[in-house]
Image: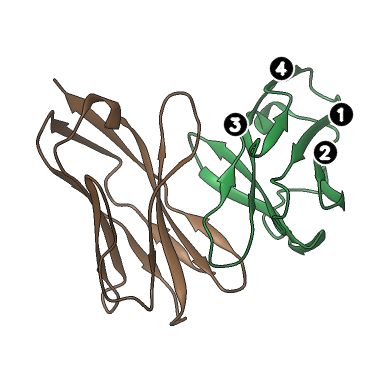
Chain colours: A green, B brown
Amino acid sequence: DAGVIQSPRHEVTEMGQEVTLRCKPISGHNSLFWYRQTMMRGLELLIYFNNNVPIDDSGMPEDRFSAKMPNASFSTLKIQPSEPRDSAVYFCASSPRANSPLHFGNGTRLTVT
Amino acid sequence: AQTVTQSQPEMSVQEAETVTLSCTYDTSESDYYLFWYKQPPSRQMILVIRQEAYKQQNATENRFSVNFQKAAKSFSLKISDSQLGDAAMYFCAYRNNNNDMRFGAGTRLTVKP
C-alpha cells in the first residue's frame, strides 16, 4: 500500500499563473477529500468526492478553484489564476467508507509570489 | 454544518507526565465518528485514535485514550507517560455518515524534557 500520493511536494509560482495539484488515492478507496491548511484558518475542507462524483464543494473559496476526479485513481485541484493569498499546504485524503478515518497524503506546499 | 472546537491553542507537558487535550463538537446527529490526528513538523497527518459515537466504551491505543461524553458533545484526548516524540499539533475531527469530515483548529503540544 503506497498510501495517498500527492504531487508536487512543493510548488512556487508567480501570481496569475495556473497551478495544478495532483492526487492519487489509495486503491479501493471510494472517497477523496481536498483540504487547505493555513496558520490563520487551520484545516479547511475544500471539496470531497464519492465514487468520483463531487458531493460538496461549498468550501471552494472562489471560481478560481476547480477540482476534478476523472477516474477512481486520480484527482486534480486547479487554481487559475493564482494569488498570493492562495499560499498554503494543500492536502489530499482518501477513505474506503464513511465510518473510516481519512488517509492523508504528504501535502503540497504552494507558494504564490 | 457541524463544528469542532479545540479551545487550547497550546499546551505543554513534562516528559513522562500526563496531559489532556480538549475537544467539543456541535451536531444534531446521533451516529457519527470522532478522531484525533497528530501532525508533527514533517506535516504528515497521522491517525492517533478513533471513537464511534454508538460505543459507550472509551477508545484506547497504548498511551493514548479518550474521554468521550456524548451528551456533553465532548471528546478529549489523554496522553499518558508523555514522550518527546509526542510533540506535535493535535487535531480533533468529526465525521458523519454523509462522509463530511471537519477538523478543529488544533492544539500545539510541547513536551519538556
Which amino acid does the dot numbered 3 rest on? Asn
Read off the chain for label 4.
A
Which amino acid does the dot numbered 4 rest on? Thr
Kindly report which numbered mark, 3 or 1, lies closer to the viewer in this rendering. Answer: 3
Kindly report which numbered mark, 2 or 4, lies closer to the viewer in this rendering. Answer: 2
Which amino acid does the dot numbered 2 rest on? Lys
Q: Which residue is mark 3?
A: A106
Residue nearest the observer in this picture, A65 or B51: B51
The count of marks equals 4
Give SS at disc 1: loop
Residue at x 18% of width, y 35% of height = B82
Residue nearest the observer in this picture, B58 or A92: B58
Read off the chain for label 2.
A
Q: Which residue is mark 1?
A: A18
Give SS at disc 4: loop
Of mark 4 and mark 1, the one earlier in the sequence is: 1
Q: Which residue is mark 4?
A: A113
Read off the chain for label 1.
A
Of mark 2 and mark 4, the one earlier in the sequence is: 2
Label 3, residues with CA under 10 Å away: few <14, some 14-19, many ≥20: many
Residue at x 75% of width, y 40% of height = A24
Q: Which quadrant would residue A65 be assigned to in this image?
A: top right
Instruction: State the quadrant of the C terminus of chain B.
Output: top left
The correct choice, above or below, for B93 with respect to A109 in the image is below
Kindly report which numbered mark, 3 or 4, lies closer to the viewer in this rendering. Answer: 3
Q: Which residue is mark 2?
A: A78
Label 1, residues with CA under 10 Å away: few <14, some 14-19, many ≥20: some
Q: CA distance from mark 3 to mark 4?
A: 22 Å
Residue at x 26% of width, y 46% of height = B8
